[in-house]
Amino acid sequence: MSASNQDGHDEKFKRKAISVKEGQAKILSFVGKGEQERVALPEAQGRILAEDIYAPHPYPHFRRSGMDGFALLSNDTIGCSTDKPVFLEVVDEIPCGSLPSVSLIPGTVARIMTGAKVPDEADAVVMFEMTESTESQGKAYIELKREIKSGSNITPVGLELKEGDLILEKGRRLSAGEISVLATFGIYSVPVIKRPLVAIFSTGSELLGVEEPLQDGRIRNSNTYMLASQIRDAGGEPYILEAIADDLATARQKVQEAFVLYDMVVTTGGVSVGDFDIMADLVSGEDVDMLFNKITMRPGSVTTGAVKDGKLLFALSGNPGACFVGFELFVRPAIGTMLGISQPFLKEIQATLGREYVKVNNFTRFVRGRLELEEGRLVAYPAMLDESSVMVTIKDSDVLIVIPPSSRGVQPGERVTVLQLPGAR
Amino acid sequence: MSASNQDGHDEKFKRKAISVKEGQAKILSFVGKGEQERVALPEAQGRILAEDIYAPHPYPHFRRSGMDGFALLSNDTIGCSTDKPVFLEVVDEIPCGSLPSVSLIPGTVARIMTGAKVPDEADAVVMFEMTESTESQGKAYIELKREIKSGSNITPVGLELKEGDLILEKGRRLSAGEISVLATFGIYSVPVIKRPLVAIFSTGSELLGVEEPLQDGRIRNSNTYMLASQIRDAGGEPYILEAIADDLATARQKVQEAFVLYDMVVTTGGVSVGDFDIMADLVSGEDVDMLFNKITMRPGSVTTGAVKDGKLLFALSGNPGACFVGFELFVRPAIGTMLGISQPFLKEIQATLGREYVKVNNFTRFVRGRLELEEGRLVAYPAMLDESSVMVTIKDSDVLIVIPPSSRGVQPGERVTVLQLPGAR
């Protein structure tokens, strides 16, 4: 929504366009990995693991019964059959969590529960249902009519994991399965990467606060809330700061302050005063090193990246669509890299275009769209409205469809690359 | 890890197996939609919308310039060309957020910024770069060498949304795109469904606390933390309560108390004391109405559902794999329904089996696995270890592969239904 959002000022602001991949590479070379902290296991969900975790003990760590039944010595069952049953004395009972109380000798068995520790002398468990219980002279026996193979129904030590196995790699996002593993191995204090603190500035005097009544010619400030949501989803902690006014000195001071307090600064919108663009001026000043100020993409070609003392500044478009795409292509990977995620970029997959996309492009387009599964094929449908200014189609998109520069567009049925938006479900 | 986890006790506990779909249907018939509350927009992420939201005004709500340029009356450009340029006087300047200060009359134009309101009299905007600026007698003019079509570079009122359009349906999960829409329309106080409060009990004397040192024959209580993560992911608020001891009266009292304080109760593990199963006794008592206590599925066939005063109790297996699957098939949909999500079940898609699965099944198996995209086809790989007792493969699974009852197993290349696990990314 500002003078920075179009090509006319390129000469003035010395813009030299680079590709998305070049821009991403520049950013990543300046991103440092965030610091480590420890959180309690119940708070670890969604956090990113900071260290490799190795199994401190095998799992299972004892020979576990897989059945409710009787632990026995398989040798005792050799040769037994329906015609020639064997009778074995029940000398122990082992519930879950208990240890055997006697040693098994040939001819004896222990009643055992699923999950309980198998006595060291036993080499098999027979299912309860395969036995008949009898009594003789005040002693309990089971009658068995078939041979039991050594190892039956015993889960060996270390079946799932050996001691020292790598169980979770650093950079991994912690979800239910990982949390189960951490709990299993007694890791309650979990090493994770601190969430990067990200300052958000909106700029532009046309913006109304969300709670202000509508005014003619002005729009509400929706991008800061959208960005806060994207930042949170990417693993950062968003801080919505006061809007930057139309004054270069003030803007510079505010951004300077934010660089001290936060790990990253994201702005949306240029600050246009007549033909001036304060964000562009800011990143061309000596305060920060400009990494790029033009990307060969639509929407969001004037997306700007800069660095100051190792901290990144992203100046995104004020157009909702362009702001959204600029975040997903540049800011999300930057946050992900700070968190130590090994694949910080949007996941790239191949799909078939479901509807023609005929806009002529000199730059690569990242078109909001939906991915559908049709007869086993992935089909991507571009949104009907995809102008950079369009807000309404963001909510219905789960992919960005990559349309390379073209003078003829892309037809239905053609192969396209799509980038999956992780914020969407 | 208890006597409840196998078939031997079916007769004793009067178990009659029903199918997963029958069990799900029974649950849903008892689930009430949760209450509504309002949260501030920055807190709305991930919450479920409680009301349909209609556009309170069109969007855009004024005719918006799509370019930096000049707003003009297209009639003034009729017949103009390189040989026959037209000169139009610049009488106004309209930055974003400002209103025109004069009315345009034929022969005049207004300098206008992208996103600013187009003067009512103008019917087109010409791009800055297509004009030459000149001056004459202290007045500013632009020189134009081609006709400009009416409507050029003007975004009409309501292009994206008309007043009264349904913009967000209730039951929708709020992510960046939805938050952008809410902000755009000034909806800061967002109606959402309260997160259901879910009590978690573990049972079983074999369980060690996560921070306790390992002991022979005992395992750490990992399921409660896994369940807490699953509950949070499903949109509920988990409360890990003290483990239930091996005593029916105490167990009954604790569950009763939980029914008062929470919206749902989930237990993991039977409480086995010798051959007794306290959870099974509990749900067969008069305190609660049993909905089902056996499901024709593996793992987790003894998953139990019950209801008391409209609140649901789920007694899940103590085996990690069975507990996980039981949650995903029954508890997640129950929480989702309380939240008003229209599709509360795991998303079902078709894929090709990537590796043979030859276990003989009398019940439907829900096998943990991974979904890969290979040459445009979705291929599902069952985990190498999928016993109900296995914990380690949960973290690497993003689907449950549905293997119907079979005496021969399923071969690679055969079509299978898979259920997508939303907790995984």
Image: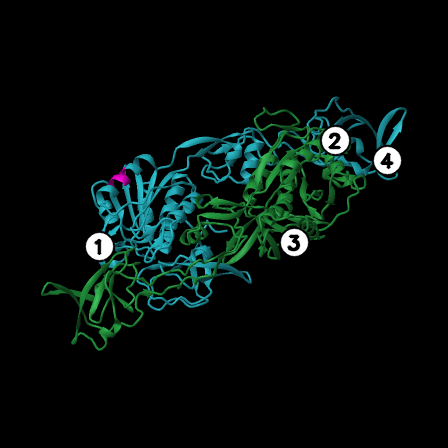
Chain colours: A green, B cyan
**Magenta span of residues:** B252-256
Q: Are marks 4 and 1 in contact (CB under 8 Å)?
A: no
Q: Do discs 1 and 3 share a chain?
A: no
Q: Indicate the quadrant containing the N terminus of chain B: top left, top right, bottom left or bottom right.
A: bottom left
Q: Which mark is residue A248?
A: 2
Do discs 3 and 4 belong to a common subunit? no
Amino acid residing under circle 3: Val
Query: In the shown orientation, is residue A212 left or right of residue A359?
Result: left
Disc assigned to residue A410: 3
Instruction: Report the mark closest to the observer, 4 or 1.
Output: 1
On screen, A146 above or below A176?
A: below
The answer to whether residue B92 is left or right of residue A124 is: right
Q: Chain of mark 2?
A: A
Q: What type is the residue that disc 1 sits on? A: Gly
Q: Nearer the viewer, mark 2 or mark 4?
A: 2
Distance, label 1 to label 2, CA atoms, is 77 Å
Magenta segment's dominant SS is helix
Q: Is residue B288 visible?
A: no
Name which residue lies at 58% across and 32% down. B184
Query: For the point 80% across and 42% down, which residue is it?
Result: A14
Q: Which residue is mark 1?
A: B274
Q: CA distance from mark 3 to mark 2?
A: 43 Å
Closer to the camera, A369 or A11? A11
Residue B402 x %, y %:
39, 58
Q: Which residue is mark 4?
A: B85
Residue A90's x, y, as percent? 18, 64
Mark 3 nearby-residue class (10 Å; few <14, some 14–19, many ≥20): some
Kind of element beneath mark 1: loop
